[in-house]
């Protein structure tokens, strides 16, 4: 029995589609993305974003996150705080007795990853006292006088505007600059000229702090009003004339009394041979000796 030889063809690899390489690369990238999908990106936010309060005040702060199902979260601060209300993605706190500049931190943990953000709370000292001074308080028309306004223990000076008012009319205004947060005195001095219409009209001073750009409010205070006495310069000569007339009349009165006394003594000497004053002096000496 003869076996016929069958020719064998050499082995060749299977042909690969040009798109199969991109498919493997896509699968590899997808595998990498899926590996880190356990830590989804999220944000932590606070409201308000800026906060400036008067010393001793309390404020409400909202702490929230974009994570749909956060594991934990809260507000960290050295201030006394109270949780007012909460839901899955936010918590509402009230912080008390803010007496100095401080930072509060809001944090959330989502899928094992923690994010946080901070809020700086600044303390300001409002213009509780506004003191106005005029000198002199009695001035002639056309003469100069000084208006001074003092605002003690105020901070910050930046954004503080002190305005001198004559009734409702602005006489002078000054806005302070500087970043010092410690309380200090702000003072404005302005020299001006007295006019006839200034007589008995009130002057005042207004101190205003605009803290709205820094998370605060618009705070202002006004001094007690003060009136200025204004007189015409012609009154000076009238006063001098009156004083001169009174002085002349007084001099004439005293002179007439002295003349009457002298003439009376001479008349008494011609009648009795002695002055009345001498006789009275002798009688007083005899009475004293007796």
Image: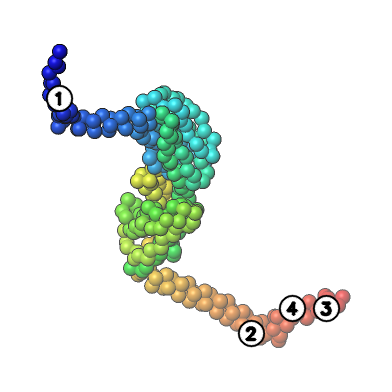
Q: Whole-percent x and y of residue 223?
A: 43, 51
Category of crowding for the residue at label 4, using alpha-carbon neighbours closer than 10 angstroms: few (below 14), some (14–19), many (at least 20)? few
Query: Height in image: 241 above or below 128?
Result: below
Category of crowding for the residue at label 3, using alpha-carbon neighbours closer than 10 angstroms: few (below 14), some (14–19), many (at least 20)? few
Query: Height in image: 35 above or below 143?
Result: above
Question: Mark 1 or mark 3, which has the lower sequence index?
Answer: 1
Q: CA distance from mark 2 to mark 4?
A: 15 Å
Residue at 32% x, 32% y is: 32
Numbered badge on residue 280: 4
Question: Mark 3 or mark 4, which has the lower sequence index?
Answer: 4
Q: CA distance from mark 3 to mark 4?
A: 10 Å
Q: Which residue is mark 2?
A: 266
Q: Whole-percent x and y of residue 149?
A: 43, 58
Q: CA distance from mark 1 to mark 3?
A: 184 Å
Question: Mark 2 or mark 4, which has the lower sequence index?
Answer: 2
Q: Which residue is mark 3?
A: 286
Question: Mark 2 or mark 1, which has the lower sequence index?
Answer: 1
Residue 91 in which image quadrant: top left
Q: Quadrant of the C terminus?
A: bottom right
Q: Which residue is mark 1?
A: 8
**How does the figure colour the protein chain or chains?**
rainbow
Residue at 70% x, 80% y is: 277
**Residue 154 vs residue 65, the one in the foreground:** 65
Residue 238 in which image quadrant: bottom left
Category of crowding for the residue at label 2, using alpha-carbon neighbours closer than 10 angstroms: few (below 14), some (14–19), many (at least 20)? some
User: Which residue reaches farthest right?
Assistant: 290
Category of crowding for the residue at label 1, using alpha-carbon neighbours closer than 10 angstroms: few (below 14), some (14–19), many (at least 20)? few
2 vs 1, front mark: 1
Q: Label 3: state its secondary structure.
A: helix
Q: Label 4: state its secondary structure.
A: helix
Q: Label 2: state its secondary structure.
A: helix
């Amino acid at each position: 029995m003869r076996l016929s030889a069958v020719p064998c063809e050499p082995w060749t690899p299977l042909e690969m589609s040009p798109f199969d390489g991109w498919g493997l690369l896509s699968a590899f990238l997808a595998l990498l993305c899926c590996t880190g999908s356990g830590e989804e990106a999220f944000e932590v936010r606070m409201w308000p974003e800026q906060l400036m309060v008067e010393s001793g005040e309390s404020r409400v702060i909202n702490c929230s996150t974009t994570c749909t199902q956060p594991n934990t979260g809260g507000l960290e601060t050295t201030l006394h705080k109270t949780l007012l209300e909460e839901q899955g993605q936010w918590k509402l706190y009230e912080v008390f007795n803010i007496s100095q500049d401080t930072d509060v931190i809001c944090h959330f943990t989502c899928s094992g990853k923690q994010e946080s953000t901070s809020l700086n709370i600044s303390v300001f000292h409002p213009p509780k006292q506004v003191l106005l001074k005029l000198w002199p308080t009695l001035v002639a028309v056309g003469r100069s006088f000084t208006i001074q306004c003092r605002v003690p223990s105020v901070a910050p000076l930046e954004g503080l505007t002190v305005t001198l008012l004559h009734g409702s009319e602005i006489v002078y205004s000054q806005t302070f600059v500087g970043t010092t947060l410690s309380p200090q005195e702000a003072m404005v001095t302005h020299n001006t000229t007295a006019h006839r219409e200034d007589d008995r009209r009130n002057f005042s001073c207004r101190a205003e702090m605009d803290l709205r750009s820094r998370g605060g409010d618009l705070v202002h205070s006004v001094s007690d009003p003060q009136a200025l006495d204004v007189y015409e310069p012609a009154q000076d000569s009238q006063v001098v004339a009156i004083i001169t007339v009174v002085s002349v009349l007084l001099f004439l009165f005293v002179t007439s009394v002295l003349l009457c006394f002298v003439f009376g003594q001479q008349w008494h000497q011609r009648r009795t041979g002695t002055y009345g004053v001498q006789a009275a002096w002798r009688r007083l000496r005899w009475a004293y000796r007796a």
